[in-house]
Every structure is written in C-alpha cells, then in structure tokens.
Amino acid sequence: MLKVYNKRALTRGQRFMKAVLFGIPTALIAAIVYGTITRLVHIEFSIFFVGVGYLLGYVIQNTGKGVQPRFSILGAVLAVISFLLGDLIAYYGLQIFLYPTWLPYGLYLVLISWFNITSISGILGFAFRAAGIYFAYVNSRVV
C-alpha cells in the first residue's frame, strides 16, 4: 500500500498557535484604535464592538482553520481582552500603561462601567459588547 504524507500540512496544535499568533496582535491593534478614537472624539462607538468580534473571528478562522471549540474560546477571550483594553485606553489614555499600579483600579472601574445598566445607553453598551463577544465566538472556527 502506498502511503502519502503531506509534509507541509500543519498539525492541530500548530494551527492553534498560528491562530493565537495572528489573533493577539489583531486584538491589541483593535483595542488601541478604538481607545484612541474614543478618547479623541469623546463618543462611544458601540457598533465597533460587533465589528471587532467579526474581525477577530475572521482572522482566527482563516489563519487557524480549526474545528475544535478552543478556537471559539480563543476568539471570545481575545474579544473580551480587546474590549477591556480599548475601554481602558478610552478612559485613561495610553499613559495608564506607564503606571502599572493604576491598572487594577482602572480595570475595576471599566468593569463597573460595563455593568452599569441603569440607563438605556448602559444597556445598549452592554448588549453590543456581548454581541461582539458572541460574534467572535461563533465566527472563530470552521463549522
């Protein structure tokens, strides 16, 4: 029997690492872009969260080409990290990273603002963030 091996094919672990290596910079760039624009304009663009979710899902799906649930979990986790960092930059600017002792307090205040659903804008902001995480989760793997 003739055995044919595809030497250039990536294994599951290598595809996942490729998805991680392309997903992390995408999430960081999206966070910096969102945070900087929001800081300059002083308007929260909630639809941006859905776009970032789609973007992260697209990048992870096309670079990783995985079918395991860990690709979806990676997309959702990177979306949450991107949203947290973007809001942190929007509230405090990039200089927050120069003072590492302020980071826990800043993250705490960002998370409190996420769950501040006492007004319609708070509810919509939370809904758009949840939708972005959902779209990153759903679109991150080949199904």
Image (cartoon, helix red, strand yellow):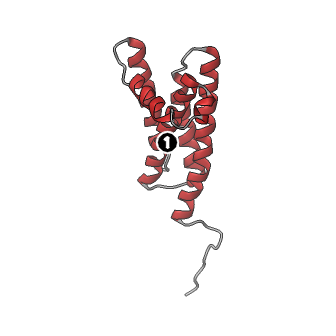
Amino acid at pointer 1: Asn
Q: Residue at x 60, y 79 (%)?
A: 4
* Residue 67 sits above or below residue 99 on the image: below
| x and y percentages locating residue 133 in the rendered image | 45, 35
* 10 Å crowding of disc 1: few (<14), some (14-19), many (20+): many
Q: Nearer the viewer, residue 107 or 141?
A: 107
Asked whether, in this view, residue 110 is left or right of residue 56, the answer is left
| x and y percentages locating residue 3 in the rendered image | 57, 82
* Residue 96 sits above or below residue 58 on the image: above
Q: Residue at x 55, y 67 (%)?
A: 11
Residue 59 figure quarter: top right
Q: Nearer the viewer, residue 115 or 60?
A: 115
Which element carries disc 1, helix, strand or loop?
helix
Find the residue positioned furthest to the bottom. Answer: 1
Asked whether, in this view, residue 19 is left or right of residue 136, the answer is right
* Residue 137 sits above or below residue 43 on the image: below
Circle 1 sits on which residue? Answer: 139
* Residue 55 sits above or below residue 41 on the image: below
